[in-house]
Amino acid sequence: FFFHDRDGHADPFLTTFAYLEAAKRLGVVCHRFTECTGILVEGGEVRGVETSRGTIFAPVVINCAGPYAQFVAAMAGIEIPNWSERHEIMITEPVAPGVCPCMLMSFSGNYYIQQRPHGSIICGMSPEGRPVDFENKTTWQFLEKMSGVLAKLLPRTRGIRVARQWSGMYDMTPDAQPIIGETDVKNFYHSTGYSGHGFMLAPVAGKILAQHIAGRKPDIDFSMLDYRRFARGEHIMESNVV
Ligand SMILES: Cc1cc2nc3c(=O)[nH]c(=O)nc-3n(C[C@H](O)[C@H](O)[C@H](O)COP(=O)(O)OP(=O)(O)OC[C@H]3O[C@@H](n4cnc5c(N)ncnc54)[C@H](O)[C@@H]3O)c2cc1C
């Protein structure tokens, strides 16, 4: 059992829109529903991106395409060993506080379970095999298995209703650690491969890459997260992924 008094939680939906609003206040322009279809490279240096709505010239381009990062990297002629795995998750109707008194997470048991502040219990587990279908679909097999784990660990959840079930893609790398940093194309950067940890890593990952690009010393040295580590066989294995 672990307790850390600086651990916390945040709603990913609200947080994403909060990031967007904060970025807009800093002058960022967000082009929604605009697909990147090509990376412009000239003389080994990035020049911008081709998109479904035209060309955008840019002195710096960051590949942060999550589960599609390997395809965007390939647009610049760069190979990264990422693949994408579909993971399912579900949330129950709100129940009395304390039905799940603390966050439960087991790497050997393959589950995470937490009660949200409004009472719903959110939980997930890794899929069997590696579903790489890019379909954000859900399965009754997950529902059945996850409900069984929930009822076994937290007997008071027996009989409560599941409100919603959904899935998303984990952007995986061979050591389940991110790829952050420069590439063989000058000023084309990676920030990818966050597996099941990208929400909590996003603030620091964004900050250190921005510091590096702006020519400042990053708060944390991230050179070990270079994508060329895989070719060198320098894996930094992260086994704590559900
Ligand atoms: C079920 C589930 C539970 C999770 N739980 C946690 C958790 O508890 N804690 C945690 O830290 N992390 C968790 N994660 C992982 C976390 O959600 C991811 O690591 C994180 O969202 C990755 O962020 P990202 O910005 O790298 O990629 P994404 O959030 O996937 O964003 C990539 C974006 O790139 C866009 N894109 C892709 N290709 C193109 C293109 N060609 N042109 C234009 N845009 C493109 C996509 O549309 C998308 O908007 C979970 C993930 C799942 C699926």
Image: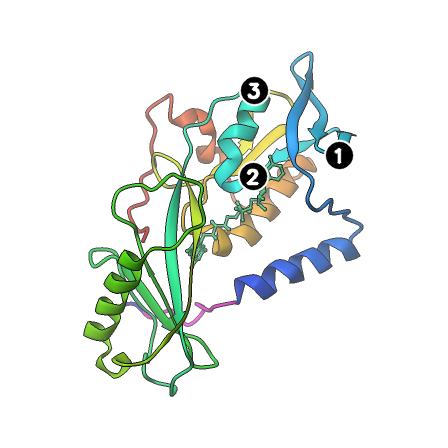
Which residue bears the numbered disc 3?
Answer: 184
Q: What residue type is labelled 2?
A: Ala
Q: Can you give x and y, in whole percent of width and height, for residue 99 in the image?
A: 32, 83
* Label 3: element kind: loop
Q: What stretch is highlighted in magenta?
A: 3-10
Q: How far apart are marks 1 and 2 (CA)?
A: 17 Å
Q: Nearer the viewer, residue 74 or 177?
A: 74
Is the Cβ of the residue at disc 1 closer than 8 Å to that at disc 3?
A: no
Task: Classify mark 2: residues with Cα within 10 Å, few (<14), some (14-19) or many (20+).
Answer: some
Which residue bears the numbered disc 1?
Answer: 53
Disc ID at residue 137:
none
Q: Which amino acid does label 3 sit on?
A: Asp
Q: What residue type is labelled 1?
A: Arg
Q: Can you give x and y, in whole percent of width and height, for residue 123 in the image?
A: 35, 66
Q: In which quarter of the image is the N terminus?
A: bottom left
Q: Can you give x and y, in whole percent of width and height, for residue 104 in the image?
A: 30, 69
Q: Looking at the image, is 144 positioned above or below residue 132?
A: below
Tell me if 60 is positioned left or right of 67 in this view: right
Tell me if 121 is positioned left or right of 44 in this view: left
> Is the CB of the residue bearing disc 2 within 8 angstroms of ligand 1?
yes
At x 31%, y 41%, the residue is 130
Q: Does the magenta-highlighted stretch encompass residue 2?
A: no
Which residue bears the numbered disc 2?
Answer: 65
